[in-house]
């Protein structure tokens, strides 16, 4: 039988099949052959068109990278992967619906249109010209092929055409704009009287029975949350640097390397600054001729320099080290010999003629003065080089170990402890959500494993394990009695203030004066806008929520804020001014039209989605 197989493998048919396989592999890869038999897996079908698993996973990866880039300290453990996958799938379904609609409307881009768009995109240009290598590299970094990127652009562009067409069609009437401006620019006249908590203190009493009853009715509020005591190893660049030993020989070698940098050279410069324009060349030529004829640089600076401050001092800029001036200015200055004047130097300020007036050099301080500083620099540099290596080793050791003592001993690190860490976190480094989530995971909390090595900050990584677990428990009444009493006192005070305010308003509405009600003086405010912060947001919100008073009448309201209540008497509402020809009117009209267009586009999206046949495996 083996002989038959061997003979058939040499036949013409076998050679043809093998040849086809080789061509397929060389052009499309193994996926094309396997996919030809099995079909590419899909994650959803929209009106009969598949969203492939490969496309879905690629966009999930891109979205994850985007969300990481928005973090101050990127940490993959903080990503909600399930939410990302759901958001991406919803987005791809919506995109598919919109591209299908665009196709039905006959919206499309030709290959030439795509080429034109790509070659004009700044991210694919070098020195203002399209660069194919940069384009291909950027597309590959996105996890896409060139053809796939072009097709994505084609789809997205036509969808954007639909969006722009609908969004720009939003219409708003001028009267609606004017009415909104009247309300926005409206001012109000009102008066305020404020009562403090002292005014109702005799009406507030919280007994022990009240405290106990509240405790019994709200026991879930006094649960001590479950917590753990954790043991952990913190690997930081600073801690690693402290373990690095620097020999005296290393220190001397480093000092010799740095001595030229540690020596200071300051140069005193003068300059004549000319504005860069049509007459600049002629002006500079005139100055150079007069310098050559023996005239003073300082005198010419006073006559010609547009840097009026230094011109008064003959162009003198004083002494400066490297790193102070514009790079072009600095390069020219430090290339001059003492007393020499440079050729014209162009910077963003204009054109300079620079004269080197003097040079001051300071030798490097002796090693004894710099020993501690240089030792820290060397230790930091060596720690930086070792950090990635030690971090990788710690991750491997902690993953395989049953505790943290072994990895700590092998790497010369310290095992620390931190108590009372809840699911909401604790003191640093357990204020890091990703580390806390791992600490309370099934494997770590119940199975006794170490966490993964988590990066909790720049150059700081932590691995931890649960030392002891504390179940949630009820706090005894005597521990929380004062807290409950204070809360009940605040609550009853607010209720008493509200009741007092209601009684005062009823008296005012019946015609009594503030004096008759035993109140203080009203504070009056006229033509106050809703954005006025003088009285605080709560009071102003109450003022502008009251109904417009009738002629000669007042409308009253109240607002409790903190430990006081404010009684408000609204006297008048002043209409806001509207200038239909002004910029404010035009901007608001444009803004409202844009909002209306966006609302219509969202409704159109929802309509297409509601009427699409969507299947998800």
Image: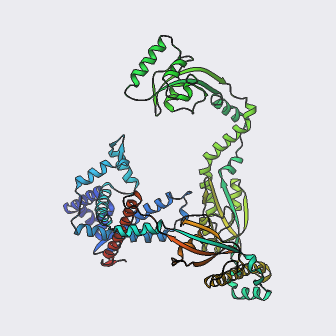
Question: 511 or 248, which lies in front?
Answer: 511
Q: Is residue 54 visible?
A: no
In the picture, residue 264 is in which quadrant?
top right
Residue 490 lies, in percent from the top left, at 71, 78
Q: Nearer the viewer, residue 492 or 351?
A: 492
Q: Pick the quarter of the image with the N terminus.
A: bottom left
* Image: 86 above or below 454: below
Q: Residue furthest front?
A: 552
| Residue most extreme to the top | 293
Q: How is the image coloured?
A: rainbow
Q: Quadrant of residue 164?
A: bottom left
- In percent of width and height, residue 587 lies at 39, 60
Choose top left, top right, bottom left or bottom right for residue 409: bottom right
Name the one closer to the observer, 259 or 108: 108
- Tell me residue 258's x, y (percent): 64, 31
Q: Is residue 465 visible?
A: yes
Residue 157 drawn at (x, y percent): 30, 60
Considering only vertical position in the picture, is 535 above or below 557? above
**As displayed, is residue 30 above or below residue 139?**
below
Residue furthest to the left in view is 12
Q: How many marks?
A: 0
Q: Residue at x 53, y 15 (%)?
A: 296
Q: In the figure, is residue 445 to the left or right of 594?
A: right
Q: Is residue 317 left or right of residue 212?
A: left
Looking at the rendering, in which quadrant would you find the C terminus? bottom left
């Amino acid at each position: 039988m083996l002989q038959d197989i061997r003979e058939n493998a040499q036949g013409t048919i076998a050679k043809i099949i093998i040849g086809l396989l080789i061509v397929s592999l060389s052009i499309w890869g193994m996926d094309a052959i396997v996919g030809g038999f099995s079909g590419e897996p899909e994650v959803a079908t929209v009106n009969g068109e598949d969203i492939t698993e490969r496309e879905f996973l690629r966009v999930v990866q891109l979205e994850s990278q985007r969300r990481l880039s928005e973090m101050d300290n990127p940490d993959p453990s903080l990503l909600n992967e399930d939410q990302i996958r759901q958001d991406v799938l919803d987005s791809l379904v919506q995109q598919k619906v919109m591209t299908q609609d665009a196709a039905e409307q006959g919206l499309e881009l030709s290959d030439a249109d795509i080429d034109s768009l790509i070659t004009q995109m700044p991210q694919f240009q070098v020195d203002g010209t399209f660069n194919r290598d940069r384009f291909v590299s950027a597309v590959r970094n996105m996890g896409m092929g060139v053809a796939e990127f072009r097709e994505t652009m084609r789809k997205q562009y036509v969808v954007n055409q639909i969006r722009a067409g609908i969004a720009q069609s939003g219409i708003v009437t001028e009267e609606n704009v004017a009415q909104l401006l009247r309300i926005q620019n409206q001012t109000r006249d009102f008066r305020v009287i404020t009562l403090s908590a002292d005014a109702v203190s005799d009406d507030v009493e919280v007994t022990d029975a009240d405290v106990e009853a509240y405790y019994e009715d709200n026991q879930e509020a006094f649960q001590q949350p479950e917590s753990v005591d954790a043991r952990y190893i913190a690997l930081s660049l600073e801690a690693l640097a402290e373990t690095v030993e620097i020999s005296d020989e290393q220190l001397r070698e480093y000092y010799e390397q740095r001595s030229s940098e540690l020596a200071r050279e300051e140069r005193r410069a003068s300059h004549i600054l000319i504005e860069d324009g049509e007459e600049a060349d002629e002006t500079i030529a005139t100055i150079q001729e007069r310098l050559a004829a023996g005239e003073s640089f300082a005198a010419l600076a006073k006559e010609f320099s547009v840097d009026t401050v230094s011109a008064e001092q003959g162009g003198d800029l004083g002494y400066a080290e490297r790193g102070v001036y514009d790079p072009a200015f600095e390069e020219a200055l430090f290339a001059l010999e003492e007393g020499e004047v440079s050729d014209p130097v162009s910077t963003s300020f204009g054109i300079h003629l620079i004269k080197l007036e003097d040079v001051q050099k300071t030798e490097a301080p002796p090693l004894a003065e710099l020993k501690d500083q240089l030792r820290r620099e060397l230790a930091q540099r060596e720690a930086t080089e070792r950090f990635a290596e030690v971090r990788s080793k710690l991750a491997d050791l902690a993953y395989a170990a049953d505790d943290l003592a072994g990895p700590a001993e092998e790497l010369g690190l310290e095992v620390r402890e931190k108590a009372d860490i809840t699911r909401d976190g604790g003191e640093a480094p357990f204020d890091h959500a990703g580390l806390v989530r791992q600490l309370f995971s099934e494997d770590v909390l119940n199975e006794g494993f170490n966490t993964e090595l988590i990066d909790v900050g720049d150059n700081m990584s932590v691995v931890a394990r649960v030392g002891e677990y504390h179940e949630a428990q009820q706090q005894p009444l005597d521990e929380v009695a004062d807290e409950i009493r204070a809360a009940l006192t605040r609550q009853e005070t607010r209720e008493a203030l509200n009741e007092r305010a209601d009684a005062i308003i009823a008296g005012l509405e019946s015609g009594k004066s503030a004096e008759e009600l035993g109140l203080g003086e009203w504070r009056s405010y006229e033509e106050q806008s809703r954005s006025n912060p003088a009285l605080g947001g709560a009071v102003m919100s109450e003022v502008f929520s009251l109904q417009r008073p009738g002629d000669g009448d007042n409308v009253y309201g109240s607002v409790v804020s903190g430990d006081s209540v404010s009684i408000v008497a609204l006297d008048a509402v002043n209409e806001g001014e509207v200038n239909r020809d002004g910029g404010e009117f035009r901007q608001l009209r444009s803004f409202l039209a844009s909002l209306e267009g966006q609302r219509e586009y969202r409704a159109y999206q929802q309509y297409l989605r509601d009427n699409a046949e969507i299947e998800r495996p």
